[in-house]
Image (cartoon, rainbow, N blue to C red):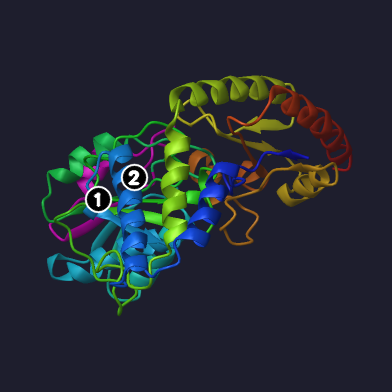
Amino acid sequence: MIYLDYSATTKTSDEVLDTFVKCSKEFIGNPNSLHELGVKSKNMIDSASKQIANLLNIKETEIIYTSGASESNNLAIKGICEKYKNRGKHIITTPLEHSSIYGPIDYLKLNGYSVDYVKLDSNGQVDLENLKKLIREDTILVSVCAVNSEIGILQPIEEIAKIVKEYPKCFFHSDMTQAIGKISVDISNIDLVSFSAHKFYGIKGVGVLVKKEKIELTPLIHGGKSTTIYRSGTPCLPLIVSISKALRLALENINNKEKYVNELNVYLKNKLKEYEMVKINSNDSCIPHILNISILGVKPETMLHSLESRNVYVSTQSACSDNNAKSKAVYALTNDERRANSSIRISLSHLTTKEELDDFITSFDKCYKELTCLR
């Protein structure tokens, strides 16, 4: 099997899984219970939170554990807009966001909020001057993903944060699901940050929303004591400890891992450029972990299933996108219907080998020749 869909999800590492099992067996007490078993469980959660805080250079009290990035995004967007709606009802975002950003924003639009989509430059990055023009007195939230999940475009997050900081009534949220654990990031100037464990070899079902200390939110889930007042429910100790472990492992030698993935990306890109009907959508502003291409005239799901028949796994759009064949992200970047209707995403990892890429190219070559001959 050749797995090249790491941006959709990653295989849980053995070390993380061992940690989950150990915690499940040895720490059975409810962390909110007052007896000895509960205290031991709470101490384990506190230790995990301390490690995450140290790794991300934040405060332990700024960590909210969630079921994943989708919940984190919903909590950030709905929580801010409900809590501070007296300040205004204007939101700014981009055409390159995940569906878990557009979902809550569309919900808020039904409740009187207005939304502007900031312009992108030729590389797909936020036009900073346009962003400045869009921010109004009633702008309550700017939400920009750090890395687009389909094409891999890396946004100038620090520059955006500086602009938003000039407006004290406005908050800056970034979905960093495709960034944290893959590239080095600085979140010190970002008000709210979302991410999920299963993108960096952790377990599915746990994520984090980092919420800076002085910011308040209206919770999505009310009732019951937890690790924070912003997300009720019995804390899942094994998942919390496992995401701490996964994050620590992901950040070890992260620069060397990124350098290696970049070498793989360049190698694969040069191989794919040899095909006449292949257009490379990912550009120099993208992280190396994602390589988005279009095979003109070939439906993406047709290429996906053709590769799958050879035990090769890629994806078309983000795994959470709707079934519309057209990639909104590719169209926003290229303004080309043909490319948007024929794109696939190849996502790489530091676990990917050059031998796997050679095998992928062999399979791709056969699929390409078969499918382009049928046009």
Q: Quadrant of the N terminus?
A: top right
Q: Looking at the picture, does residue 178 appear above or below residue 31?
A: above
- Counting from the top left corner in percent of width and height, residue 62 is at 24, 53
Residue type at tag 1: Glu
The residue labelled by disc 2 is 52
- For disc 1, the marked residue is 60
- Amino acid beneath label 2: Ile
Placement of 123 over or under 70, stated as above or below: above
Crowd rating for badge 2 (residues with CA inside 10 Å; few <14, some 14–19, many 20+):
many
State yes or no: residue 374 in magenta.
no
Q: Quadrant of residue 218?
A: bottom left
The residue lying at 59 percent from left, 49 percent from top is: 8
Give, as a single range, the part of the protein colored magenta: 117-145
**Horizontal and vertical percent for residue 89?**
22, 66
Visible in this render: residue 338?
A: yes
Q: Which mark is residue 13?
A: none
Quarter of the image with the C terminus in it: top right
- Say left or right for 7 vs 69: right
